[in-house]
């Protein structure tokens, strides 16, 4: 890695001040063993600058700190290990109908000997300000990044002998703002209250894919739902079946049931949140400190296979109840049971056909009806810390400067959610594959203790 020396530039500011700006940068060349020999060397660089303008506004006593900053950077990334050549793996031996044993097989993902390094280009500007002797302040950043040639497996037809192929694909744009507010509403010798609020809003868009493709299938899930990257659309949209409509109303067929759409590329959700944030409060009274962090996520969607099977199979409380006649809707129509699905028939008239919902007609609702808002509010973490008074350490002050005893808890309270019977964060994967729940486990609370000794 080659680092550029820090530079000091003297110039005239836009409000007539002479100011001092610091500029720094680097150029780096990496070689990776996970990329082909012809592509295993890649260079990236960055340059950044800042101006502490508060040094020129010393008459403004209420302004503690003010700084503008900007940077431009490129970052390279290599491929996951063993992504170039196809190699056999050794599953547990099993007997085939032809009378032979299978000892070795190819994996499900087709590797790629022509992979290129990923590259991300980012631009960022920010403003930091603090007031009233640093009792109040904020840090706000606007960023714009483009990532090209991302390396990941994509689903493909199994007729080629693989279920996915490792590729370089596309150009994905991300832009947004990050905001951090801090304050100390109360600060005395014995008592203090400090607060920090974070807010992030990101918007992304797929600008390019590969081989003139308009849509990239990221994953295909049980239940007929897919995760996609579509040109001109946000990265991470869920697609599947939905209702058929007539003049904006749900269509009901001659059997009294909902026919699903004839296409499976209907957009039924977007895994990206509208914004995420958090509030951290810390209270100190003498040697005792209490702090807690509340996390918030607004928006984003998740498809629940658990709800899809549970509702359509009649296992959930939502499938139980009374119909419009006041009878158990699970009873046969002949016994006063069944339900009338709201909608219209082919001629545009309101549906009046009552149907019995049994195993043969269990798939009443399409996949789009099992997409839920993944918003939540959580008490993410809380801890209580007691600092031993210095007088208790009189005999060992030469060796020990301080002792903190803490009790810590994480995931203590799911204050609000919209996904039934599950934590919205309980997804099938935490990587590119998001927005899908299957066999979601109850999340656990973690409670522990910690002793920190300062020497």
Image: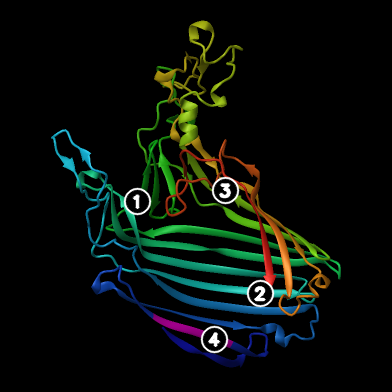
Counting from the top left corner in percent of width and height, residue 157 is at 25, 45
Residue at mark 4: 23
Q: Residue at x 57, y 44 (%)?
A: 443
Q: Is residue 287 left or right of residue 201?
A: right
Judged from the image, the secondary structure of the residue bearing numbered disc 4 is strand
Q: How far apart are labels 3 and 4 at the CA level?
A: 39 Å
Instruction: Tell which tag, 2 or 1, sits nearer the viewer.
Output: 2
Q: Spatial distance from mark 2 to mark 4, Cα to Cα?
A: 17 Å
Who comes first in sequence, dot 3 or dot 2? 2
Residue topped by disc 2: 128
- Res. 383 image quadrant: bottom right
Label 1, secondary structure: give it. strand
In this rendering, is residue 298 above or below 251?
below
**Magenta span:** 22-28
Residue 77 highlighted magenta (yes or no): no
Residue labelled with disc 3: 299
Nearer-N-terminus badge (1/3) = 1
Q: Earlier in the sequence, mark 2 or mark 1?
A: 2
- Label 1: few (<14), some (14–19) or many (≥20) C-alpha neighbours in 10 Å: some
Q: Nearer the viewer, residue 335 or 32?
A: 32
The image quadrant of residue 77 is: bottom left
Looking at the rendering, in which quadrant would you find the N terminus?
bottom left
The Cα–Cα distance between marks 2 and 1, rounded to whole angstroms, is 40 Å
To which residue does mark 1 refer? Answer: 215
């Amino acid at each position: 890695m080659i680092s550029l020396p820090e530079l000091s530039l003297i110039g005239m500011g836009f409000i007539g001040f002479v100011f001092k700006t610091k500029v720094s940068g680097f150029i780096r060349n990496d070689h990776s063993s996970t990329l082909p020999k012809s592509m295993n060397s890649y260079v990236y660089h960055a340059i950044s600058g800042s101006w502490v303008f508060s040094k020129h506004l010393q008459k403004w006593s209420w302004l503690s700190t003010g700084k503008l900053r900007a940077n431009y950077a490129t970052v390279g990334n290599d491929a996951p290990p063993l992504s170039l050549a196809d190699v056999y793996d050794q599953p547990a031996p099993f007997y085939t109908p032809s009378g032979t044993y299978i000892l070795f097989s190819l994996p499900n993902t087709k590797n790629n000997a022509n992979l290129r390094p990923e590259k991300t280009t980012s631009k960022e500007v920010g403003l930091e300000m603090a007031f009233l002797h640093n009792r109040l302040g904020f840090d706000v950043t606007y960023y714009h990044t483009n990532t090209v040639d991302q390396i990941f497996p994509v689903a493909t037809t199994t007729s080629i002998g693989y279920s996915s192929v490792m590729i370089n694909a596309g150009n994905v744009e991300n832009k947004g703002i990050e905001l951090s507010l801090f304050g100390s509403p109360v600060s005395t010798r014995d008592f203090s209250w400090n607060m920090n609020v974070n807010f992030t809003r990101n918007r992304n868009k797929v600008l390019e894919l590969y081989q003139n493709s308009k849509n990239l299938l990221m994953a295909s899930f049980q239940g007929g739902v897919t995760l996609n990257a579509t040109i001109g659309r946000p990265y991470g949209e869920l697609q599947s079946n939905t209702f058929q409509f007539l003049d904006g109303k749900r269509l009901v067929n001659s059997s009294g049931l909902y026919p699903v759409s004839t296409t499976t590329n209907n957009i039924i959700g977007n895994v990206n949140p509208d914004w995420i944030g958090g509030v951290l409060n810390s209270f100190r009274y003498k040697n005792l400190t209490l702090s807690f962090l509340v996390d918030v996520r607004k928006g984003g969607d998740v498809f629940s296979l658990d709800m899809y099977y549970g509702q359509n199979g009649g296992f959930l409380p939502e499938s139980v109840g009374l119909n419009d006649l006041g009878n158990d809707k699970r009873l046969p129509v002949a016994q006063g049971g069944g339900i009338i699905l709201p909608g219209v028939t082919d001629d545009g008239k309101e549906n009046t056909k009552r149907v019995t919902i049994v195993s043969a007609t269990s798939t009443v609702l399409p996949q789009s009806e099992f997409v839920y808002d993944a918003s939540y509010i959580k008490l993410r973490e809380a801890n209580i810390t007691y600092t031993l008074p210095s007088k208790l350490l009189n005999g060992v002050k030469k060796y020990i400067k301080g002792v903190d005893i803490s009790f810590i808890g994480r995931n203590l309270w799911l204050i609000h959610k919209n996904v039934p019977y599950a934590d919205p964060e309980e997804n099938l994967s935490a990587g590119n594959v998001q927005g899908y729940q299957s066999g979601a486990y109850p999340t656990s609370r973690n409670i522990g203790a910690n002793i920190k000794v300062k020497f």
